[in-house]
Amino acid sequence: MFPKPIEKSSRQWQIGYQVLLPFAMLLWLAPLIAVALFSIRPDADFSTGNYWGIPSSFEFFTNYGQVINSAMPRYILNSFMITLPTMVGAVALSCMTGFALGVYKFRGNLLIFFMFIAGNFIPFQILMVPVRDLTLDMGLYNTKTGLVLFHIAFQTGFCTLFMRNFIRALPFELIEAARVEGIAEWRIFWYVVLPLMRPAIAALCVLIFTFIWNDYFWAIVLTTGENAQPVTAGITSFNAQFRAMYHLMSAGSLIAALPPVIIFFLLQRHFIAGLTLGAVK
Amino acid sequence: MATTTSSDHHLPKQGWYKRNEIAITPWLFLIPGMLMFAIYVIYPIIQSFNISLYKWNGLGTLADNAKYVGLANYEKLLFRDGKFETALINNLKWLILYLLAIPAGLLIAIFLNQTVRGIRLYKSMFFFPFVISQVVVGLVFTWFYDPQYGLFNGIIGIFGIEPVNILGDRNLATYGVIAAGLWPQTAYCMILYLTGLNAVDPEQVEAARLDGAKGHKMLWYVIIPQLKPATFIAFVVTIIGALRSFDLISVMTNGGPFGKSTLVLSFYMYEKALGEFGLKMGYAAAIAVVLFLIMLVFIGYFLWSMYQDEKAAKH
């Protein structure tokens, strides 16, 4: 193990390390903690210049209550209605593409695989004008569906990379044994491979949820109004409405960031498995 | 149905599909994904190249409402556009400074790779910034830098330094935004290295220890070579993150101050197409093409590396 386990060093080092940990963490998260402290201050503290002292009163419920009474819940609902279908769609499509590319040997296999990977690395801007046009032509501009369709297509690239590598690592003998039994290929997919892909599916779901929830670029390119915009884009209008009311703006920002954070803490293991692209075990 | 290759001879009664099942199935599974990808990714790339040769305000169709101008957009971009130059230089700053996330992530990973009580929670908390959207990171740092009430100026004030308006300073603003970006990116690299450190072969470490290797020598000659897969991914995601930087600039400075100080190609492109004085679709597409070509160098290298791995895996 590297570095040397701290238990094997002197008592002073061990205590020093234990003391250093919380300090390092507070320093690392300081910008965020500052915002969290803003969000429970009363409005008056900002006008009297009491930014860093003890709050003159704790206004957690007033501040967050006002956020809940704004358009924020609407934006958050939109975010869910964009994120969840994308998650299902992209994972479903990539289970299939990953199966095709991971199990079968055929001409062009690696070429198609690399096309998916390359597409996943490109800058969004090269797609912006044509995709916006396409969405307008389909009558899906400023709708959640328009955003979902694009996200599914784009995320399929990343998900295919992940799924294909995962399937490659499965024991191929299982598939061969099924073939010898004369089981149809699509049944092999459904009954043999898919159940084994559960960890990969879980990892991708968590990851795609976070990616799509946090998307901002496509949200402002493909939607404009309250009826379709997700919370990343909505927070800007929220902030415009409560300009210079820092206690509300910080409360709003924290609420907007919350769902992926909850998912992360609940499903950490899957999240990290996904982030390392399955390449670092 | 008279396909009679030699292998089919002993299966005369099965249908055409059954006989070709292994050859056809992968394509059936690929069609939905490939179709979506072709419509929303591959074809738009080609279209952007095409649009970049026109002067077009985005209304109507390209054929009816646009004027073909050949390479004029590129000519203007490369030789007569000061903003483009600034954006390009800023992109370079992003690329170089963003790479700091890799050693920083490694350092934090080494710091946290212990088994004391509560360490899992600490690891999660250090990873935390990556889970938050860049929009919120941008807001958090905008407030952090605020000259009046920001924590940053509060801290440097303790050391008697006058408040600095980082995001309002034409020379500092880009660095301020990059620092905000490094926060989540370092967290990402950290988690890659934490998983990597877990996989380091303990026997090799022990053997090296017996040979008297320790500290930075051990790190450099024994650990880092074993972390190569993690480093590769960290490199890929950091380069891509640097060239994609958009959200932070949009939220923190909107390309400013002074109209261009923090511009990068991705934001400049958006500004030309959909910004205040926008609707220059052809020109915007040309910027996107330049960005795409820069990225293509890196994508080419990444794919080449992956291809080498694929070849090695076959043997």
Image (spheres, coloured by chain):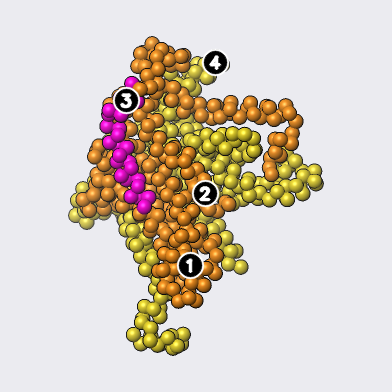
The residue sitting at 35% across, 54% down in the picture is: A89
Q: Quadrant of the C terminus of chain B?
A: bottom right
Indicate the position of residue B125 as horizontal and vertical percent values.
52, 34
Q: Which residue is mark 2?
A: A273
Q: Is residue A66 magenta?
A: yes
The orange-tinted chain is A
User: Which secondary structure is most common in the magenta stretch?
Assistant: helix
- Quadrant containing the N terminus of chain B is bottom left
Decide if residue B216 is on the left or right side of residue B60: right
Q: In the image, is B100 to the left or to the right of A122?
A: right
Are the numbered discs 1 and 2 placed on the same chain, yes or no? yes
- Bounds of the magenta span? A62-88
Mark 3 — on which chain does it sit? Answer: A
Q: Chain of mark 4?
A: B
Question: For this view, does A233 lie left or right of residue B124?
Answer: left
Disc 1 on helix, strand or loop?
helix
A174 lies above or below A84: below
Q: Is residue A201 above or below residue B214?
A: below
